Amino acid sequence: MKTVLKISLLCLLPLFSMAQKDPTWGYVTAQQADSLKRSVQIEKNDTLKMAAYRSLGFYYQDGIADSGLYFHEKQLALSKKLNRKLWQADGYSQAGYCLGTLSD
């Protein structure tokens, strides 16, 4: 089961190289969001977790901004731990979007 989840998360990684070319990058379906929520609970690879949190943040940010903010903050925490500057900038940007949606 863990192997299947890791493979499914690894399949998402090529999408990261297209981030600046595709404005819809990061968005997932409801079924994918459920799968990502389950996978982050058991995943040990922080990079894969960070990517999953980003996708979950995008999924929730327009409908349930509190949840979107929660996942973007999780992404931000991991990006700081891993010292990934681009991911940190993205985390701040997306968290700011959620805060704006919440009128904070």
Image (cartoon, rainbow, N blue to C red):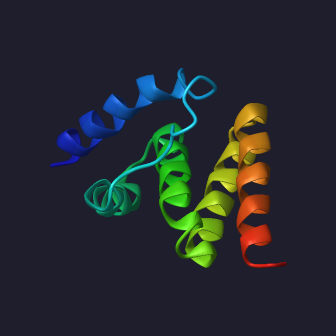
Instruction: Decide which of 103, 86 is in the foreground and name it.
Output: 103
On the image, the x and y values in percent for residue 17 come to 54, 21
On the image, the x and y values in percent for residue 97 come to 74, 60
Instruction: Decide which of 47, 22 is in the foreground and name it.
Output: 22
On the image, the x and y values in percent for residue 99 come to 77, 70
Q: How many marks?
A: 0
On the image, the x and y values in percent for residue 38 come to 31, 62
The residue shown at (70%, 38%) is 87
Residue 67 location, quadrant = bottom right
Would residue 79 be found to the left or right of residue 15 on screen? right
Q: Residue 51, relative to residue 15: is it above or below? A: below
Residue 41 location, quadrant = bottom left
Residue 5 location, quadrant = top left
Would residue 100 be found to the left or right of residue 27 on screen? right
Which quarter shows the C terminus?
bottom right
- Residue positioned most to the right: 104
The residue shown at (70%, 55%) is 77
- Residue positioned most to the left: 1
Q: Residue 52, relative to residue 100: is it above or below? A: above
Would residue 84 be found to the left or right of residue 72 on screen? right
The residue shown at (78%, 50%) is 93
Instruction: Decide which of 90, 64 is in the foreground and name it.
Output: 64
